[in-house]
Image (cartoon, rainbow, N blue to C red):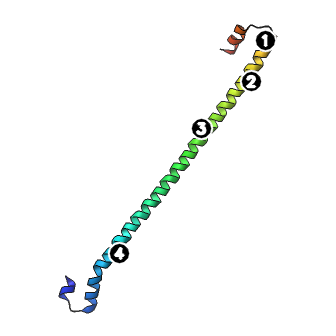
Amino acid sequence: MIKDTTTDSAIKNEAERTPEISDKIALWEQEWIREKALLDYRNDMNVARREGFEQGFKQGIEQGLQQWINQGRESLDRELTEKWRKQGKSEEEIAQLLGK
């Protein structure tokens, strides 16, 4: 509208460039939105990876401790069973003593 009503060539040139500038701004906004989405995605993946690692680490520790406890218990049960057998206890008595 301005370019149709003015005779100043500088104003006409700027008025003609306005749609071009608007297009550039729209492209910049689209690129900014895309970059922000990529950064958000990367951040979300890093958070999920970190949480997964922490959860897996905790599970591994718990499983390792449980295995260690079970192995210790089994070893102790074997030692006690052997000791009680030498003392002449029956298998029923040994099972009862072990709580089985």
Image quadrant in which the C terminus is located: top right
Q: Position of residue 66 (x, y in %)?
A: 65, 31
- Please name the amino acid that badge 3 sits on: Gln
> Label 4: how many residues lie within 10 Å, few (<14), some (14-19) or many (20+)?
few
Name which of mark 1 and mark 2 comes first in the sequence.
Answer: 2
Disc on the earlier residue, 3 or 2: 3
Choose top left, top right, bottom left or bottom right for residue 31: bottom left
Where residue 22 appears, as percent x and y from the top left, is 31, 75
What secondary structure is found at the residue carrying circle 4?
helix
Answer few, some or many: residues within 10 Å of disc 2's Cα (few below 14, many 20 plus, some between 14 and 19). Answer: few
Which of marks 4 and 3 precedes in the sequence? 4
Q: Read off the residue under disc 4.
A: 24
Label 4 sits on what residue type?
Lys
Alpha carbon separation for disc pair 1 and 2: 15 Å
Which residue has dot 2 on it?
A: 75
Q: Which mark is residue 59?
A: 3
Going by the numbered disc 2, the residue's amino acid type is: Ser
Q: In the rendering, at what x and y percent does residue 15 appear?
A: 26, 83
Q: Which comes before the other along the chain, label 2 or label 4?
A: 4
Q: Quadrant of residue 62?
A: top right
Residue at image coords 30%, 82%: 17
Most distant residue in the left direction: 5
Separation of residues labelled 3 and 1 (CA atoms): 38 Å
